[in-house]
Image (tube, grey):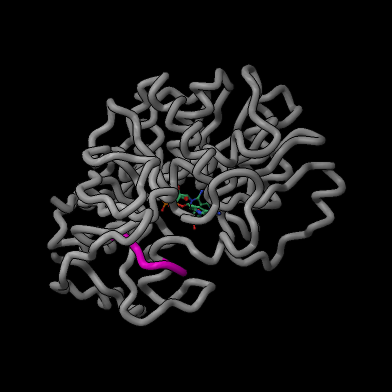
Amino acid sequence: MRLYRLTPSPELDGLRLCEEPVPQPGPREVLVKIHAASLNRRDVMIATGGFRHAIASGLIPASDAAGEIVALGEGVGRVALGERVCGAFYPTWLSGPAQQADGTHGLGGGSPGVLAEYRVFHEDAVVRFPAHLTYQQAATLPCAALTAWNALFGGPALRAGECVLILGTGGVSIFALQFAKAAGAETIVASSSDAKLARLAAIGPTHTINYRTAPKWDRAARDLTSGLGVDHVVDVVGGETLGRSILAAHFGGQVHMVGAQPFDGFDPRLILLRNVAVRGVMVGSRAMFEAMNRTIALHAIAPVISATVPFENAPDAYRLMDAADHFGKIVITVA
Ligand SMILES: NC(=O)c1ccc[n+]([C@@H]2O[C@H](COP(=O)([O-])OP(=O)(O)OC[C@H]3O[C@@H](n4cnc5c(N)ncnc54)[C@H](OP(=O)(O)O)[C@@H]3O)[C@@H](O)[C@H]2O)c1
């Protein structure tokens, strides 16, 4: 089979296309023929050596894939041959609160990734995806969609009629918009680009803000909520942005911290002064993935795909992600 192996390099030229034997499933494992993968910002950080954890040399990169179960190891009972599944981002985090160790096993980081024609998963670490989705669409779910889901519903949950401010129009952000709309919330999206905000019209945010032309976007968000502030903010950036996210939230609101840019210049006293809850989000558990899939099926949500790149050109997909001009997700078709 063909697969990629990675040696991190600041020039983003460390992906090697290799040929290796198809792995065989052991007890309670399944062999998945991968049809599509997708990229997240984390994959570029890992490929350029900018990730916070050490990466094994020759790592199989990327966390997100969808495929079909084509062989079963001894004792598999949870899933069946022919089922269409995604791999779970954290293979050991099945339900309940995450344990610290779960966070060290993320696919394509602490554990081997999915940019391969076949991959073996433990039967507990795969999730069936909704029937209306193609493999390409399903490949966008394991990290970006689940992170958006966990932000909005994994803690104190968003309720119908509440207002959510979502930063950006990338992978996590567009899923957050789709889920917030499905939940009956008022939505505000802030982007650097009027063209991207115009494209969002098809999904229908209630309000939009260009954070370049309105650098005090926290104030703009408060103005849109009669001066009160929003109930939830999904902050995919971090750093100084977190301060503005807190100021955009109403007194006692929720700020979901998804991005982790360096926090120089951020004054933590804002958390107390605005009495907000800032919640760190770590992708999500398998149970959250299953709950999210029920919502995606019920509302026939279609993931937004910005570009689709063939497997043999996967490095081009990384360059597109690095360029950060995309809208939604970047997908790699595997077979
Ligand atoms: N904690 C977790 O578990 C977790 C999971 C997934 C992702 N993440 C993090 O979440 C972030 C988004 O990931 P992704 O895969 O969705 O990346 P992505 O597709 O590249 O999206 C990045 C988004 O950030 C927006 N953005 C950049 N600078 C901004 C700023 N100053 N203010 C507002 N928005 C800004 C961009 O919006 P416009 O182009 O519209 O301006 C773009 O939509 C990354 O930092 C990633 O590391 C964390």
Residues in magenta, as a range: 109-114
| Displayed quadrant of residue 156 | top right
Residue 63 in percent (x, y) is at: 38, 57
User: Left of 142 or right of it: where is 210?
Assistant: right
Image point (81%, 51%), residue name: 270
Q: Is residue 169 above or below residue 313?
A: above
Q: Is residue 278 above or below residue 61?
A: above
Residue 45 in percent (x, y) is at: 42, 68
Question: Foreground: 88 or 317?
Answer: 88
Question: Foreground: 83 or 306?
Answer: 83
Question: Foreground: 242 or 107?
Answer: 107
Q: Residue furthest front?
A: 75
Image point (41%, 70%), residue name: 46
Image point (46%, 25%), residue name: 295
Residue 165 in percent (x, y) is at: 59, 35
User: Which secondary structure dominates the residues rendered in magenta?
Assistant: loop
